[in-house]
Image (spheres, helix red, strand yellow):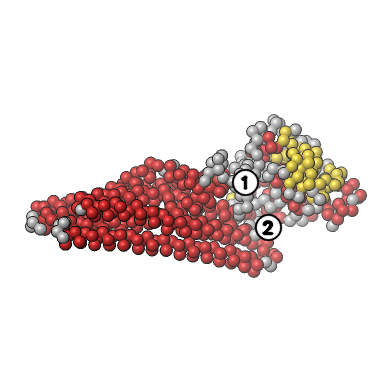
Amino acid sequence: MLDGGPTGGDVLRRAIAGQRRHVAGASLLGTAHQACEAMVPVVIGLVIDQAVATGSSGALLRWLLVLAGLFLVLSSCYRIGARMGERAGEQAAHLLRRDLGTRVLDPRGGADKDRLPGVLATIATSDAKRVGGVATVLPYGVSALAGLAISAVALLRISVPLGLLVLLGIPPLLWLGHRISRPLERRSGTEQEHAAQASGIATDLVSGLRVLKGFGAESAAVDRYRRTSQDSLAAALRAAGSRAWHDGAILALTGIFIAVIGLVGAHLAMNGDISVGDLVAAVGLAQFLLGPFQLLTYVNGQFAQGRASADRIASVLAAPPAVPAGAAAPAEPVAGALRLRGVRHGALRGVDLDIRPGSLVGIVAKDPATAADLLVCLGREAAPDEGSIELDGVGLSELDPVGTRRAILVAHHDADLFEGTLLDNVLAGGEGDAASAAPALAAAAADEVARTLPDGLGTLIDERGRSLSGGQRQRVALARALAADPPVLVVHDPTTAVDTVTESRIASRLRDLREGRTTILVTTSPALLATADRVVVLDGGTVTADGPHTELAAADAAYRSVVLA
């Protein structure tokens, strides 16, 4: 879906085309339902003319059986058609959610740029459901048009002026309905945007609730959400007002149109141009027409909202990748040599750095933004604005992102845990058992965490690891990164919430476990830096110092102020 950049129209067409069989079946059954309903007043007119007016009980019984058959067919068609339409809508929404999930999880990234997680969740749920709803209501629109056409034919048989009135009056009404739906479409899109923003901020606030409480910032957070929620409410009210105006205007137009049909029919009956039965049939058909017009009003409104949601879905599916999609695979086996030349990105201002395979390197960044930008470049979450990064002599831009991330694992400081057991979190869905995870658990001191929990490694962890302390979460997250055992491991501040004794133990065990594989520690922890083969200092976005931790601590006052303060 990325190539060519899908539009909202493409999304709508895909949703409908993917359910073509169910939509066609529901449309056919809906048409049969509308045809039977349109024939009911015609048959009643025939009952009056051929049975009531003549006093024929046989004709009365015959036409009553026909009426019973019509009601049996129309009720059966409605039930089966509605079921097929609902199925089409649900399956279309499911396919859209799958497409969105595939795009968001695309290794090239880019879908989440400038979008909060809650915004993406709203697009994948509410917007996908609205677009799927278009597949549900489309058969209603088809059957409504069929009902109007059948009514026009029936009225033509009763009276040519009545039939022509319907045939000539329907197109202008449909055009007016489309014009009236424009404000609804526009305001529906705005409503969904504000709702998604409110959802995104709420998700952010809930995930950071402990931090907010620690800073005493609850009131500021509540004020921020209140403002966003009020904007969302105002947008929803504007959309509701637009929907009410849309429905009311359409209802008024159709009411006037049906009244005109009734008046023309009454005039023809008074002049003797049509019989009493024909007049009853004409009035009944005029009343029946209200149903198809109401259906078209409903379908038009759903289409307006679906188009707005389709545009939002298309904006995610068409989001450009954050990194180029190389086709080459990393060399086998991966040696782990890294080479950075003139790398510029965000706070990075021309970084030149060589990291030997199998070495343990510490990187000290005085500015946290410098560390963050280095991590996203090494993890291929973003491509450098300038310069190049090579793995074993091959540029990362030439490598397949999936293969690159298997070779280079970046473990961010704020890595989340998932709902599941502690062991599941460490294995991260991969193959293995407690025995295979034991070395990583011991190196990260996460085995101590397991011993304090009621069910050990089988203890269930809440979403985002909220049932653990900050230090426990860090140790489990570090164990997960170590258990993956990548050729190149980049770890960012893995022990900031851990006591000094445990930190020292982790530092020595981590070096032993990663012996022979490239490891980069982006940190200011002296215990971790002391185990590194060398330490590289980034200041002002460039490399300003390089050497063993002990030498830098002894000779560089700026280094001491950052690491030993």
Q: Quadrant of residue 25?
A: top left
**529 sits left or right of 286 in the view:** right
Closer mark to the observer between disc 2 and disc 1: 1
Which residue occupies 9% across, 52% down?
Answer: 58
Which residue, given by chain and number where applicable, does mark 2 sit on? Answer: 469
255, above or below 311, in the image: below
Q: Earlier in the sequence, mark 2 or mark 1?
A: 1
Q: Is residue 339 visible in this depiction of the protein?
A: yes
SS label for mark 1: loop
Residue at the far left: name it.
55
* CB contact under 8 Å: marks 2 and 1: no
Residue at the far bottom: name it.
219
SS label for mark 2: loop
Q: Quadrant of residue 264?
A: bottom left
Image disc number at residue 99: none
**37 sits left or right of 253 in the view:** left
Residue 537 percent location from the top left of the image:
83, 47
Q: CA distance from mark 2 to mark 1?
A: 32 Å
What type is the residue that disc 2 sits on?
Ser
Q: How packed is label 1: few (under 14 Cα within 10 Å), some, or many (20 or more)?
A: many
Residue 299 percent location from the top left of the image:
39, 54
Which residue, given by chain and number where applicable, does mark 1 sit on? Answer: 110
